[in-house]
Image (spheres, grey):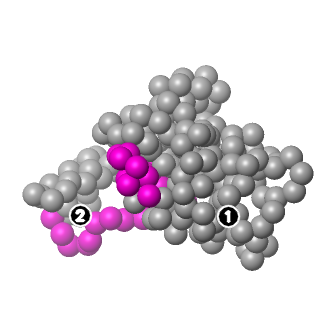
């Protein structure tokens, strides 16, 4: 398994690009999984449903299963947020894991940048950004850049930047997350 991330400011188009990259990478024969970081409380459950009631009653984990899918919800109950290596360890084997968010973590990343956002590039401050998907030029010393609409080019960049999961977990454990 290899890992690469998409990082960028809110509104840059990370999710839009990711929803184009997943089928493009799948067409190349790759099994792709994703990890999405949320910066706020979120819920995948509906109040009043049995699984919601199990969590409200204090269950640490609730696994909901059907013939089509399963979902595992883990309540931290005041414990520290899991690190990226811990979350990666929960995934089933695949060819490529794309991490959306975790922009402060030390995994290889492609920065998604949209000029109209008016935000600065992240790459000058983050040595783990190995490529750019942007609609504007990034200036001297910038990593390789592909236009936001060049899905195949961004996919190539991601595959070149991706790191084996074992090497990444060792790197993150040694340097912190």
At a point 44% along the width and 58% down the height, the residue shown is 24
**Residue 147 bears which disc, if any?**
1
Residue 143: image location, x then y, percent: 76, 47
Quick one: 132 or 12, which is closer to the camera? 132
Q: Magenta stretch? A: 24-50
Q: Residue furthest bottom?
A: 116
Residue 9 in sight here = no
Quick one: 28 or 42, which is closer to the camera? 28
Residue 67: image location, x then y, percent: 10, 57
Quadrant hosting residue 51 = bottom left
Residue 97 in sight here = yes
At a point 19% along the width and 56% down the height, the residue shown is 69
Q: Residues within 10 Å of mark 2 (few under 14, many from 20)?
A: some
Q: Tell me the element at label 2.
A: helix
Residue 55: image location, x then y, percent: 25, 57
Tell me the distance, in whole angstroms, between the alpha carbons under discs 2 and 1.
42 Å
**Residue 52 bears which disc, if any?**
2
- Name the side, left or right, on which 28 lies relative to 162: left
Q: Residues within 10 Å of mark 1 (few under 14, many from 20)?
A: some
- Taking the magenta stretch, the answer to whether it contains residue 59 is no
**Circle 2 or circle 1, nearest the eye:** 1
Quadrant hosting residue 151 = bottom right
Q: Tell me the element at label 1.
A: loop
- Name the side, left or right, on which 124 lies relative to 13: right
Vertical comparison of 97 with 6: above or below = above
**Residue 32 bears which disc, if any?**
none
Q: Where's the C terminus, which quadrant? A: top right
- Taking the magenta stretch, the answer to whether it contains residue 34 is yes
Q: Where's the N terminus, which quadrant? A: top left
Lower sequence index among marks 2 and 1: 2
């Amino acid at each position: 398994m290899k890992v690469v991330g998409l990082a960028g400011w809110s509104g840059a188009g990370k999710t839009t690009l990711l929803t184009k990259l997943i089928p493009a990478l799948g067409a190349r024969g790759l099994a792709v999984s994703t990890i999405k970081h949320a910066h706020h409380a979120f819920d995948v459950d509906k109040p009043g449903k049995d699984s919601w009631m199990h969590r409200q009653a204090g269950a640490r984990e609730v696994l909901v299963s059907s013939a089509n899918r399963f979902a595992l919800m883990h309540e931290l109950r005041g414990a520290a947020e899991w690190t990226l290596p811990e979350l990666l360890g929960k995934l089933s084997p695949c060819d490529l894991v794309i991490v959306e968010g975790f922009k402060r973590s030390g995994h290889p990343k492609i920065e998604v940048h949209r000029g109209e956002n008016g935000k600065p590039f992240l790459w000058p401050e983050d040595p783990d950004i190995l490529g750019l998907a942007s609609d504007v030029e990034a200036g001297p010393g910038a990593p390789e850049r592909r236009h936001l609409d060049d899905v195949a080019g961004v996919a190539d960049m991601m595959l070149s930047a991706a790191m084996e999961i074992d090497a990444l977990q060792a790197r993150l454990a040694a340097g912190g997350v």
